[in-house]
């Protein structure tokens, strides 16, 4: 049975406060509360949430009545792959990785869980979003643009910064390039099989501070080089998330309509 790994240990630098706990739902829910509901409804049987040390007690109290939710502390913010590596020590089967400050939509989560149950047991997956469905009305965002092969397998991801749409709907990045609305991007909704798990520790053992943060793109790139296959599952869901402080109001309006 798949386990959800929720990454909620980010610094929220641009947002200015812990966005993992921001009350945005009609009943004061945080975005990760909705992601947990979607994952359990789709078929996940447990979840591991990776949090910052200063948030441990808050999360432990929040989920005290839900034994299927476990909390793992990332003592140092060393990157998303490091957070996943810590969480993997708590699980044994296929995992679904999601960000704690993003809401992917019920359909996207169902696609991920469906692949976990019915996809090839040796094939990982990425649920990829159309770029136009992942933009913020409050300012530019960074997205990982996907390249795929003729079979729909992931070849690579490339981070593009400052993406935003103008009044006419034209999407440009910080470097002035124009991007088609249907460009596929990663929002960190992954399905990973156990065969990939040892690679996290292998790569981390040789990682140094000079390499920057130990991020998921590093592991995915190395995995593809070692002939791991990642199916790209296209979704037309509209992403909802917190990047800029003003996003909180937009998210509350979105959730009031759709949740």
Image: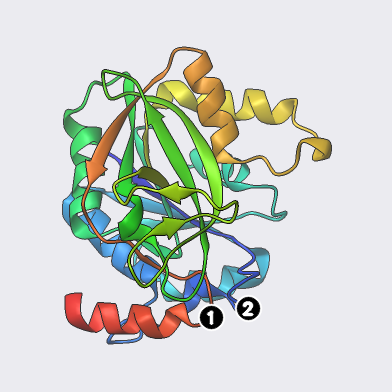
Residue under the image location 41 percent in, 48 percent down: 179
Q: Quadrant of the C terminus?
A: bottom left
Mark carried by residue 16: 2
In the depicted view, which residue is nearer to us: 128 or 198?
128
Q: Residue 84: in sight, yes or no?
A: no
Under tag 1, what secondary structure?
loop
Under tag 2, what secondary structure?
loop
In the depicted view, which residue is nearer to us: 259 or 116?
259
In the depicted view, which residue is nearer to us: 37 or 127?
127
Q: Quadrant of the N terminus?
A: top left
Q: Residue 94's spot in the image, x, y percent?
A: 34, 33
Q: Residue 189's spot in the image, x, y percent?
A: 37, 46
Mark carried by residue 227: none
Residue under the image location 55 percent in, 39 percent down: 216
Colouring: rainbow
> Residue reaching furthest top?
227
- In the image, taking residue 111 as reference, residue 133 lies left or right, namely right
Q: Determine whether label 2 and label 1 are within 8 Å by CB.
A: yes
Q: Residue 174's spot in the image, x, y percent?
A: 58, 56
Q: Is residue 137 above or below residue 171?
A: below
Residue under the image location 45 percent in, 50 percent down: 178
| Numbered label tally | 2
Q: Residue 31's spot in the image, x, y percent?
A: 37, 70
- In the image, taking residue 64 as reference, residue 17 lies left or right, namely right
Name the N-terminal-most of marks 2 and 1: 2
Mark carried by residue 245: 1
Pointer 1 local density, CA inside 10 Å: few below 14, some 14–19, many at least 20: some
Q: Is residue 177 above or below residue 20?
A: above
């Amino acid at each position: 049975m798949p386990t959800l790994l929720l990454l909620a240990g980010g610094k929220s630098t641009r947002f200015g406060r812990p966005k993992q706990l921001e009350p945005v739902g009609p009943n004061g829910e945080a975005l990760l509360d909705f992601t947990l509901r979607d994952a359990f409804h789709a078929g996940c049987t447990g979840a591991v949430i990776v949090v910052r040390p200063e948030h441990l007690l808050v999360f432990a109290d929040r989920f005290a009545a839900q034994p299927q939710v476990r909390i793992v502390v990332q003592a140092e913010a060393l990157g998303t792959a490091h957070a996943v590596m810590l969480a993997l020590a708590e699980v044994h089967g296929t995992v679904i990785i999601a960000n704690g400050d993003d809401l992917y939509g019920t359909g996207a989560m169902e696609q991920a869980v469906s692949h976990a149950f019915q996809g090839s047991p040796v094939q990982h997956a990425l649920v990829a979003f159309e770029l136009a469905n992942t933009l913020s009305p409050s300012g530019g965002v960074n997205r990982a643009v996907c390249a795929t092969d003729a079979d729909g397998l992931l070849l690579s991801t490339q981070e593009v910064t400052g993406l935003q749409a103008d009044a006419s709907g034209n999407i440009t990045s910080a470097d002035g390039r124009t991007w088609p609305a249907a460009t596929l991007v990663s929002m960190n909704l992954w399905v990973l099989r156990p065969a990939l798990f040892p690679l996290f520790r292998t790569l981390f053992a040789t990682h140094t501070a000079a390499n920057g943060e130990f991020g998921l793109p590093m592991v995915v790139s190395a995995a593809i080089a070692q002939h791991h296959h990642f199916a790209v599952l296209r979704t037309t869901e509209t992403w909802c998330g917190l990047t800029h402080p003003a996003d909180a109001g937009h998210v509350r309006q979105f959730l009031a309509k759709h949740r």
